[in-house]
Image: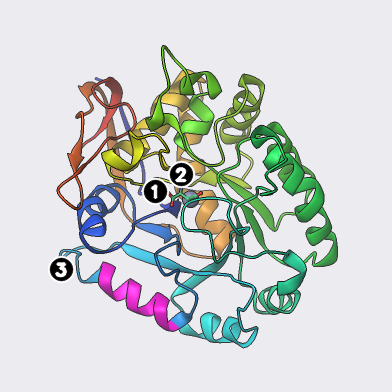
Amino acid sequence: MTTLRIRRPDDWHLHLRDGEALAAVLPHTVRQFGRAIVMPNLKPPVTTTAAARAYRERIMALLPATSAFQPLMTLYLTDRTDPAEIAVARASGIVAGCKLYPAGATTNSDSGVTDIRRIDAVLERMAEHGVPLQVHAEVTAADVDVFDREKRFIDEILVPLHLRLPSLRIVLEHATTRAAAEFVKAARSNVAATLTPQHIAMNRNALFAGGIRPHHYCLPVLKRESDRVALLEAAVSGDPRFFLGTDSAPHARAAKETACGCAGIYSAHAAIELYAETFEAAGALERLEGFASEFGPRFYGLPLNAGFITLEKREWIVPQHYPFAGGDVLVPLRAGEPLAWRMTD
Ligand code: NCD
Ligand code: ZN
């Protein structure tokens, strides 16, 4: 049997939700990852260090006493974020970055930023204090084609921002286009991107394979095959500016399988296995450890995890669903289908 032992990975972009949903999904991430960057798009969003601390405590309260898992918290930027909050966040030691959601871009982003120039003072403080900016890189204007929204955001917002504040550390979250990979490669070394398991393995045909597939719908949406190829090349290239971020985003089945389904793909149940399968198919399994376990900590200035995990090449069938909140279930990526790798306990 083929086995692969790698340093314990981290997830640099994760949605954990709250309450019952948090309790349902947290064990999946904790089993695989040493740390995770926890997104702040709760209702209401996590906009202050005090709220991030309280959320972190709710997560910690659900962890087994023996767990070494560390949630790394983020603040949700709004038009009204107080620039003074950045120093508070930095001093807290629990906030790993601030998330920029353009208002209306995705799930729970109504209170996001309406115009980046409104948060100039906040971004300047972030650059000063070395606090990374995590970006949902999509313009939101209704007249912009949904498949062009990432590229337009890069050209109109990110390129000027990087020129204006070259010392600001930026993570282009869940990159979905060749344009995103090229932007990161052309930028300074303080600009990076996270890559999800779905965007390096699937293209937009997966949304329409034999019928409409709500469980393949996330934001930013899957793009063309040429985009997928560019992202996969970046992932397996060994370039440390590209690292693992699942964007695992759980929604109840009823909220996905409906006339207006929520955006979000759940992948935490098999995250490292999904990446292993795609890296193996690309002939690059030996590059998985850097991508999953080394480049993220390096970017965030954190130590590598001390422990290791083992993956076996052993086929298993992903369950059709997992328990979730409100009596509903959660349909995971690859539900009911075989997966080639399995992490051993
Ligand atoms: C995320 C969610 O559900 O919170 N959904 C998604 O499709 N990725 C929000 C986000 O990251 O855009
Ligand atoms: Zn996300």
Q: Are marks 3 and 1 in contact (CB under 8 Å)?
A: no
Is 15 inside the magenta-drawn segment?
no
Secondary structure beneath dot 3 equals: loop
Identify the image quadrant of residue 319: top left
Up-down: is 40 above or below 197?
below
- Say which residue label 1 marks: 9
Q: Which residues are magenta?
A: 50-59
Label 2 is placed on what type of residue? Ala
Label 3 is placed on what type of residue? Ala
In the rendered view, does 259 fall on the left or right side of 343? right
Instruction: Determine if residue 2 is in view.
Output: no
C-alpha distance separating marks 2 and 1: 5 Å
Identify the image quadrant of residue 166: bottom right
Secondary structure beneath dot 1 equals: loop
Q: Are marks 2 and 1 in contact (CB under 8 Å)?
A: yes
Q: Position of residue 260 (x, y in %)?
A: 42, 38
- The residue nearer to you, when weighing 10 against 309, is 10
Q: Give the number of the disc on residue 292.
A: 2
In the image, what residue occupies the spot 57% across and 84% down? Answer: 85
Task: Say whether disc 2 or disc 3 marks the residue closer to the N-terminus.
Answer: 3
C-alpha distance separating marks 3 and 1: 20 Å
- The residue nearer to you, when weighing 37 against 161, is 161
In the image, what residue occupies the spot 77% across and 69% down? Answer: 117
Image quarter of the N terminus? top left
Up-down: is 185 above or below 341?
below
Identify the image quadrant of residue 46: bottom left
In the rendered view, does 239 fall on the left or right side of 296? right
In the image, what residue occupies the spot 66% across and 33% down? Answer: 147
Label 1 is placed on what type of residue? Pro
Q: Position of residue 239 (x, y in %)?
A: 64, 41
Q: Give the number of the disc on residue 65.
A: 3
C-alpha distance separating marks 2 and 3: 25 Å
